[in-house]
Amino acid sequence: MTATIARETRTKTPAQVKSTVIGASRIVISFLFGCHGLQGFGFFGGIDGQGGGVPFGSFPGWWGSVFELVGALLLLAGLASRPAAILLSGVMAYAYFTVHAPMGLLPLQNMGEPAAVYAWVFLLFAAIGPGRFALDNLRKR
């Protein structure tokens, strides 16, 4: 009897594996993005590599950093994850088109690969949901 129960608990369905991978990816990506948001406040070398942050209240730099950090924390916890992911996707699309695109057509030319990738990854999370380990899943019960 216990061998049967042990075997059943070890066997995960493809849907469970998919949800686990999505949840783990959401956690890792939002943590990394939160670190990116903290750079705007001078952490991790800041925006200039010497600990400099964007001036308090400046638009779009300071507000962008606030959106990045708050959105990353919400996504990390899986709380209001779809709206947070849409907001973060928009923030990164805005950053790409206002900061990077004027320097060149392609992301490889304008150093906008991270902004473009984050925008699309967050759009993906908005579409597919937070996966496992999300506080949003507790609200559905």
Image (cartoon, grey):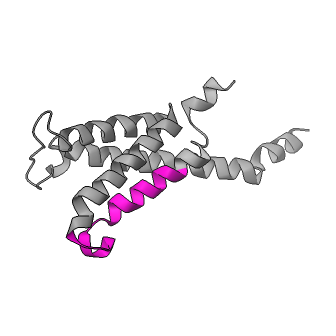
Query: Residue shown at 50%/51% (left/top)?
Result: 123
Indicate whether 43 appears above or below 109.
above
Quadrant of residue 140 in the image?
Answer: top right
Quadrant in which the N terminus appears:
top right
Left or right: 71 in relation to 48:
right
Magenta region includes residue 119? yes
Query: Residue shown at 52%/39% (left/top)?
Result: 82
Query: Residue shown at 19%/44% (left/top)?
Result: 61
Q: Nearer the viewer, residue 80 or 86?
A: 86
Is residue 97 shown to the viewer in this render?
yes
Is residue 78 shown to the viewer in this render?
no
Left or right: 137 in relation to 82:
right
Magenta region includes residue 126? no
Indicate whether 140 appears above or below 88.
above
Quadrant in which the C terminus appears:
top right
Q: Nearer the viewer, residue 73 or 4?
A: 73
Magenta span of residues: 103-124
Q: Residue furthest right?
A: 1
What percent of the width, then of the height, locates residue 36?
28, 49
Query: Residue shown at 85%/40% (left/top)?
Result: 5
What percent of the width, then of the height, locates residue 137?
62, 31
Tag count in the figure? 0
Left or right: 136 in relation to 141:
left
Q: Nearer the viewer, residue 115 or 131?
A: 115
What percent of the width, then of the height, locates residue 118?
40, 55
What percent of the width, then of the height, locates residue 86?
46, 43
